[in-house]
Image: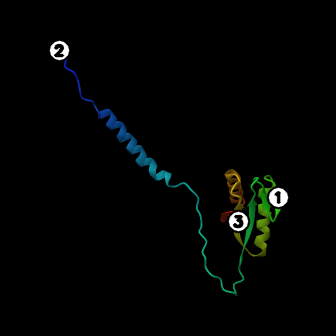
Amino acid sequence: MKRQTFNEINITPLTDIFLVLLIIMMVIAPMLDQQGLNLAIPDYVEKSDNDNTENKILTVVVSEDNKYYIDDAEVSENMLASTIKEKTRELSTEGNFGGLMIEANGNSDHGVVVKLMDTARNTGINSISITEI
């Protein structure tokens, strides 16, 4: 008796796997879109000459060797939060506090800048801008 050979591939299990993967991707895809930072783009509106309500901005410089400087004075990582709170309080009493400007050197570590951003958020600053020096 001669045995008949089976020359076709059963693709039903393969199709089932692809359908399950497709469903998983369709469920996960909307969740991936919710990550990121909320960035505010500044309005470039010309101010009139009699407008005296200028916003005060706290500037923190991150140097190439990953050190923080506020008003040209080096601030240690341990004292960063308290110094930012103090400077924010001073600027708030003088006028409208506009937020924090981070001037980071292009060769500074990303983690150092992110730590500064997290510290500023934890001290209550909601408006943060970053520029490269």
What residue type is disc 3 on?
Answer: Leu
What residue type is disc 2 on?
Answer: Lys
Q: Looking at the picture, does residue 9 appear above or below residue 60?
A: above
* Residue 84, picture quadrant: bottom right
Element type at mark 3: strand
Q: Nearer the viewer, residue 24 or 9?
A: 9
User: How far from the left and from the top, in percent, is residue 60?
Assistant: 75, 62
What residue sits right under mark 3 in the picture?
100
Residue drawn at (49%, 55%) of the image: 33
* Residue 103, picture quadrant: bottom right
N-terminal-most mark, 2 or 1: 2
* Residue 56, picture quadrant: bottom right
What residue type is disc 1 on?
Answer: Glu
Instruction: Judge depth for marks 3 and 1 and give the one in front.
Output: 1
What residue sits right under mark 1 in the picture?
74
Q: Is residue 6 left or right of residue 23?
A: left
What residue sits right under mark 2 in the picture?
2
Element type at mark 2: loop
Q: In whole angstroms, how far apart are the C-alphas of marks 3 and 1?
A: 17 Å
Q: Looking at the picture, does residue 14 appear above or below residue 22?
A: above
Q: Quadrant of the C terminus?
A: bottom right
User: How far from the left and from the top, in percent, is residue 6?
Assistant: 23, 24
N-terminal-most mark, 3 or 1: 1
